[in-house]
Image: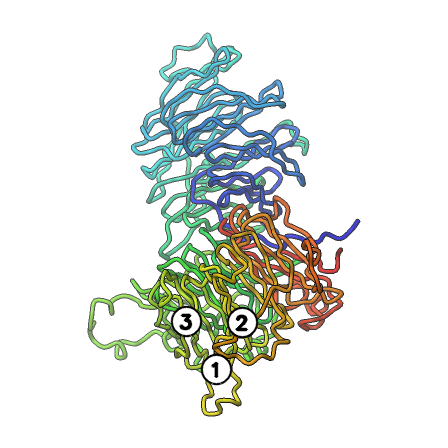
Amino acid sequence: MAAPIIETCHVACCANRTPNVLSWGRGGLIAYGTCNSVALYDPQKCVVAVLNGHTGRVNTVQWVHREDCVSLILVLSKAYVLFLCPLPQFKQYVECVGHTGPVCAVDAIHLDNNKLLIASTASDSTVKLWLYTGSKGKGSFFCLSDRQVSCPAVPILACGGDDCRIHLYAQCNGQFRKVLSLQGHEDWIRGVEWACVDGDLLLASCAQDCLIRVWRLVAKSRTKRNIHACCLFAPDASSAFAVTLESVLAGHENKVYGVHWQPPLFVSPTGGDQHQSLSLLSASMDKTMILWAQEEGSGVWVEQVRVGEVGGNTLGFYGCQMSPDGSMILAHAFHGALHLWTQSHGKEGEWSPGVVISGHFNAVQDLSWDPEGEFILSVGSDQTTRLLTPWKRMDQTQPTWHEISRPQIHGYDMQCLAMVGRFQYVSGADEKVLRVFRAPRNFVENFANISGTPLAKLLASSDTVDQPEGASTPALGLSNKAVFQGDLTPKTNEEEGTGFNSVSDRYQESYFHPLTLNEPPPEDHLLQNTLWPEVQKLYGHGFEMFCLASDSGRTVVASACKASKAEHAAVLLWSSTSWRQLQALPCHSLTVTQMAFSPNGLFLLAVSRDRTWSLWKRDDPAATPTNTEPHFSLYTSTRKDTAVHTRIIWSCDWSADNKYFVTSSRDKKVIVWGDCSSSEAIVTPDEPPVIRPCSSILDVGDSATAVSFCPILCPGNSYLLAVGLESGQVLLYKWELSEEPAGASDWTRYGETDSSQSHSLTVKRLRWRPRVGRAGQGGEEEGEGSITAAGSSWVQLASAGADHSVKIFNINRLAV
């Protein structure tokens, strides 16, 4: 079998901000909605598959199991889709359209005749029942106001709504009829779930009144119906159920959004008899999960374990799940983060935080590799900067990628970043200011522990003089303040003085605590203890920042902001040593969408919304010996009457040999220009050098929003390019210089991402790893760290998408 050309190495994504968006399957896979997709996540490894197909946000996901262990995933958004399992094939199986509002809950049971009964509820105040027979979906529905849905092992339907009641419906003669409303909660019902124990049914409900109620439905003979509780009849009309309130659980201090029974254990691996453990898990907006169980002897429900976050400025948990064997519990938070706790072996009642994946909870706008290719920085509209790096578990041979630092948590949506050296970067957001950040010593030490890189090597590549221990954000501030070793030492009364000079002196300014990490940190540490200090602010732009670029020599940073006039569209150049403004480069009339320095730092390329590009050349230092700062002059540019692109130029990049650059546009065209290295023309205002397309015009069939040259040449001195589309797909092309290219004969389609590998929304940025090999695999694959090791077949490509995800692909450049 031929080696695959594109392999998915990692998908960084978080859960959507809805209560029922995550479900833990019997096989160990966690399914959760992320933007418009569903991620299937193995908590011991990584995301193993992504299911695309929805055009709106996925609101609820639910595993449904049969006794023969065949599983289905129910996925709902505005119109919902069923996906058929088992592994490893996932495909869209049935699409049911009917709701007129966003779907917020779903559940299903298998009937005796091998049919599937599905109940779904939506914000259109309806519950719809669907009967799936194996060939097509059909259903009938009735209307009521409710929030949650759940079905036990018998066709009894429980619906909790904003009327603070739980409505029970029982099936009779093929129709569901309302038989009882359970009262007791004093606020909206947020979750209901059934469990079957020794023939009785237990219904757990949670609400915004901070309470959990456990109801018991006890089977009674039809001949003994003189009971005070209301009776529900099973569909076979042979028995009735008495409904009583079992217990009221009070322990949370805020709204309770999720309740979940421990999954039943099956006696045999093929299904059949099952044992239900009476353990109930709850999650609340007070940032805690509580594991409840009945006390032996008395049968009173008591709190067994409480886990959660302490401190921070985040909101609480939206839902919870328990692993099939009950050894792990998982919560998903308001900002999409996953929180995993694992029961300690041999220590009952002790739970420790586990390692999980994470991701942005809004569109990812930009990303960049560090110069050594060992980690990735990404920024997004969720106002955060995140750092991903590979980490190898003790019991595994392949590394998995994890977030180990969150250098910046901002108050504005992030738009762009540029690495300046290995442990320093510049970022821009929806503000007029650029901010410069430098890694603290605590991060460098922890990065060495997690990545396995010698600490001495890392310290040699960074400025260790007066390096702070960490950073913290002051109250109501946007700037990360450096925390030095002296700030961590408790002050005595004499040092503090006898009184407070101001109100702010009464409160601790620094919330940073240095960590010694050997594995990726949990979410609360990422929020509080992994910030990078801000070392500089750069002022000069008149509008919100849009794009950034830095040269390979770490001497110059170029920036551009949003602009509707030529006076604001100028590119500003900054010195990366003094951080003062060097130049303003006026040329374009609208926003500069992207910039790129040539690998040798000689040229700066800028593309714009005005459909043109401009090329700037660094002046020869020998010509101006008195000026030691870099200076750029306009080399050449296209005008509206000479432009080839007819729509916005979104992206650009340089080839590794500095000869060619590529542009991509909304007009679906990708064009290679050059040769820039062969032109020795003298730049004059009257006759600037002319750089023409040296490739045929490649039509990719969709708006080309991102493009990138692979820094490693392919065999035969051909070039490998990645093109990102507005549809979310990533295309790979080989381009080879031809004297007379005709009909795109110089382009060869090399590969493309399939439906599960592609983004579900626009590709915002593509970046190749600057070195060959796969990060985290060791020097043997990377040719001992060389940049152009011809023998290595693997290169890596990172992509940022508007679907909130960062994806890393392994590309086999030698597989044809």
Examine the image and state in which quarter residue 741 appears. Answer: bottom right
Q: Amino acid at mark 2?
A: Phe
Q: Where's residue 130, x and y in %?
A: 52, 23
Mark 2 burial class by Cα count in 10 Å: few <14, some 14-19, many 20+: many
Q: From the viewer's perspective, is the residue at label 3 or at label 1 nearer?
A: 3
Vertical arrangement, residue 177 with respect to residue 736, above or below:
above
Determine the secondary structure under disc 2.
strand
Residue drawn at the location 36% of the way across and 33% of the way down = 189
Query: In this image, 771 relative to 56: left or right?
Result: right
Q: Amino acid at mark 3?
A: Pro
Specify the farthest residue to the right.
1
Residue identifier under label 1: 630
Q: Residue 586, labelled with which disc?
A: 3
Residue lying farthest front?
686
**Disc 3, SS:** loop
Using the image as rendered, state which of residue 512 and residue 298 is in the foreground: 512
To which residue does mark 2 refer?
597
Position above or below: 300 against 44: above
Determine the secondary structure under disc 1.
loop
